[in-house]
Image (cartoon, helix red, strand yellow):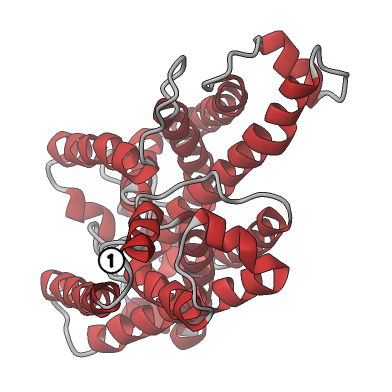
């Protein structure tokens, strides 16, 4: 039986092939439209009211009505919106890869400890530099510090994922594996908490602000570094689409199909670590995007084919993050809400809706 046929057999609700293809194409167009709409709104909304027409003119390179509007759009809001694109697509794809690799619907960068591992790597770099994780501290590190942060966070995420993966060879129960991931996250969190206990109060305040998640600290060269690393991670993820389809059917079947499981697993670990590590390093831990978006795209597109789910997750993750960032800014107000709080408030109902709607979510992973 071919891989395509077996993957199609895992789709919870079967639909005619032509109708299913049209449905998936239509949803991809809708998601792309939502990304464009969210991108423009994210730049247009904020504490300073700028007409949408003026925003479009500035984005098209035409002179703005005031230098202040040009500065706000070009130097503050545009980098933040671009960061939202990278963060949303990267977290969603990393969550999709982990759920397929572990064949666990609850797997995600934050649940299995990758975010905590990346956070520990960032804390180590900041501790060694005599500073703490925070938007101002990240800016002060310069381009060399940016690469150090990415390397440390990616290494921390990769070590945690490698440990969870090694234990998964001995633990076949997905629930037990999930508990193992949560315990590893607890240990890494405890190490960071111990460091906080012996730190100065002002350092703890900066670190707490970083843990709330923010897109505002990534500008200039830091945005370039983040875009490069996330781009590499996404390329590796798309290159592993066929392997993910086969792994969805189980490792034994994948080996019988001639798939080099070890090589594919390494590629997926590298991709996920780059995505989750770099995003956590620059923006702090942002929850629920990685776990909620893959479920949302499977429910909308009704497919388990990763050649479709990967681009759909990119678009849905970017649209969700842009929408959440619009909400955090509370238009007309000077208050900015923590991004991770908003993503959790929106992400948890999405997961509950998918679980209650589909009842047997495990069927997508068997």
Residue 114 versus residue 310: which sits nearer the camera? 114
Q: Is residue 142 left or right of residue 45?
A: right
Q: Position of residue 59 (x, y in %)?
A: 77, 25
Q: Secondary structure at mark 1?
A: loop
290 relative to 76 in the view: left or right:
left
**Residue 33 sits in which quadrant?**
top right
Foreground of the two, 252 or 346 = 346
Query: Measured from the top left, where is residue 289 in percent x and y?
Result: 37, 47
Q: Quadrant of residue 41?
A: top right
| Residue 236 found in image quarter | bottom right
- Left or right of residue 228: residue 177: left
The image position of residue 52, as x and y in percent, is 66, 12
| Mark 1 surroundings within 10 Å by alpha-carbon count, few (fewer than 14), some (14 through 19), many (20 or more) | some
Residue 234 appears in view:
no
- The residue that disc 1 covers is 103
From what the image shows, is residue 278 above or below residue 96?
below
Query: Considering depth in this image, is 274 or 354 the residue closer to the camera?
Result: 274
User: For the point 44% across and 80% down, which residue is it?
Assistant: 124
Residue at 79% in and 15% down: 66
- Residue at point 81%, 12% (across, down): 65
Viewer-proximal residue, 34 or 17? Answer: 34
Assign the N terminus to one quadrant of the image.
bottom left
Q: Is residue 302 above or below residue 172?
A: above
> In the image, is residue 283 above or below residue 43?
below
Q: Position of residue 286 (x, y in %)?
A: 38, 52
């Amino acid at each position: 039986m071919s891989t395509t046929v077996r993957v199609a057999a895992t789709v919870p609700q079967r639909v005619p092939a032509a109708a299913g293809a049209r449905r998936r194409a239509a949803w991809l167009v809708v998601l792309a439209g939502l990304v464009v709409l969210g991108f423009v709104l994210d730049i247009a909304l904020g504490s300073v009211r700028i007409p949408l027409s003026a925003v479009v003119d500035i984005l098209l390179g035409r002179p703005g009505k005031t230098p202040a509007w040009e500065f706000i759009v070009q130097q503050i809001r545009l980098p933040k919106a671009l960061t939202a694109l990278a963060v949303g697509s990267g977290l969603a794809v990393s969550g999709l890869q982990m759920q397929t690799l572990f064949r666990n619907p609850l797997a995600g960068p934050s649940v299995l400890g990758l975010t905590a591992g990346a956070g520990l790597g960032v804390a180590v770099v900041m501790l060694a530099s005599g500073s703490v994780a925070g938007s101002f501290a990240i800016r002060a590190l310069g381009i060399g510090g940016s690469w150090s942060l990415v390397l440390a966070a990616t290494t921390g995420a990769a070590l945690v994922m490698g440990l969870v993966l090694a234990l998964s060879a001995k633990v076949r129960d997905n629930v037990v594996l999930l508990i193992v991931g949560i315990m590893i996250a607890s240990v890494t969190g405890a190490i960071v908490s111990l460091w906080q206990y012996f730190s100065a109060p002002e350092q703890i305040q900066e670190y707490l602000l970083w843990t709330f998640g923010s897109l505002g600290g990534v500008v200039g060269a830091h945005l370039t570094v983040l875009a490069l690393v996330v781009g590499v991670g996404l390329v590796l993820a798309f290159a592993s689409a066929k392997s993910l389809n086969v792994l969805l059917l189980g490792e034994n079947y994948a080996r019988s199909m001639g798939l080099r499981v070890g090589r594919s697993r390494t590629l997926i670990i590298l991709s996920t670590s780059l995505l989750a590590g770099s995003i956590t390093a620059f923006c702090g831990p942002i929850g629920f995007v990685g776990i909620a978006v893959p479920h949302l795209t499977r429910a909308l597109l009704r497919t388990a084919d990763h050649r479709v789910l990967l681009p759909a997750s990119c678009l849905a993750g970017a649209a969700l993050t842009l929408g959440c960032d619009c909400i955090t800014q509370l238009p007309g107000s000077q208050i900015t809400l923590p991004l991770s709080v908003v993503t959790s408030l929106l992400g948890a109902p999405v997961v509950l809706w998918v679980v209650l709607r589909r009842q047997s979510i495990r069927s997508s992973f068997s």
